[in-house]
Amino acid sequence: MQNLTKTGKIGTGVIILIVLCVLLLGIFFVVWGGYNKAIRFDEAVKERWAQVEIVLVRRFDLIPNLVETVKGYASHEKELFEHIADARTKYFQAPSIAAKAQSASQLQGFLSRLMFLQERYPDLKANQNFLKLQDQLEGTENRIAVERKRYNEAVRAVNTYARSFFGRSFCNMAGVEKSEYLEATEEQKVTPKVKFNP
């Protein structure tokens, strides 16, 4: 009778130990999976920003050629050329994604003004270099729009996870912070005014 009681206690102890091990192992895998998910989301945001930067740099590389082409026709537009150069410099010196996005947005506004110069200078419209650069710039702008959209999708994923009940803890544990969306500036929301010379 005593042997059965001892065997029952040993069996119960082993079962409790096994259940505790399974629970601890389950908790470990949940924490491990949540932590890794936070890291994956963070890396996706960084990768998407890198893609945005690649096409922004392409835009910045096209600008000096475009400006030089336009200068021959519109040499008195010096202020605009200076603004473009300043925005380009600010972008490469910007310490954060938000600062780079702001510089890129400013530059986009100046580029719009530069492209509208062709309406004031009819000879510029016929310049083959200008037309080629304009086509390349339009293609680059389309790529920027696509990459910005993908970046914002990655930001949405990490921010949603960071706001979820357990995701917040995993993001804090992994050192993952919420990211900022790339949004249109007030300047970009205003429709540019085009004046055609008769």
Image: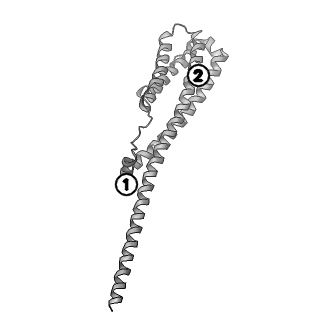
For residue 122, what is the image quadrant? top right
Question: Residue 62: which numbered mark, if any?
Answer: 2
- Residue projecting furthest to the top: 76
The amino acid marked with disc number 2 is Leu
Q: Is residue 162 left or right of residue 66?
A: left
The amino acid marked with disc number 1 is Phe
Q: Residue at x 58, y 29 (%)?
A: 140
The quarter of the rendered structure image containing the C terminus is top right
Q: Secondary structure at mark 1?
A: helix
Q: Is residue 91 shown to the viewer in this render?
A: yes
Crowd rating for badge 1 (residues with CA inside 10 Å; few <14, some 14–19, many 20+): few
Say which residue label 1 marks.
166
Q: Residue at x 37, y 54 (%)?
A: 166
The quarter of the rendered structure image containing the N terminus is bottom left
Q: Is residue 15 left or right of residue 51?
A: left
Q: Earlier in the sequence, mark 1 or mark 2?
A: 2
Location of residue 138 with respect to 77 vertically, above or below: below
The nearer-to-camera label among 1 and 2 is 1
Q: Residue at x 39, y 76 (%)?
A: 15
Cβ atoms under marks 1 and 2 closer than 8 Å: no
Return the x and y of residue 50 as percentages of the image width and height.
52, 35
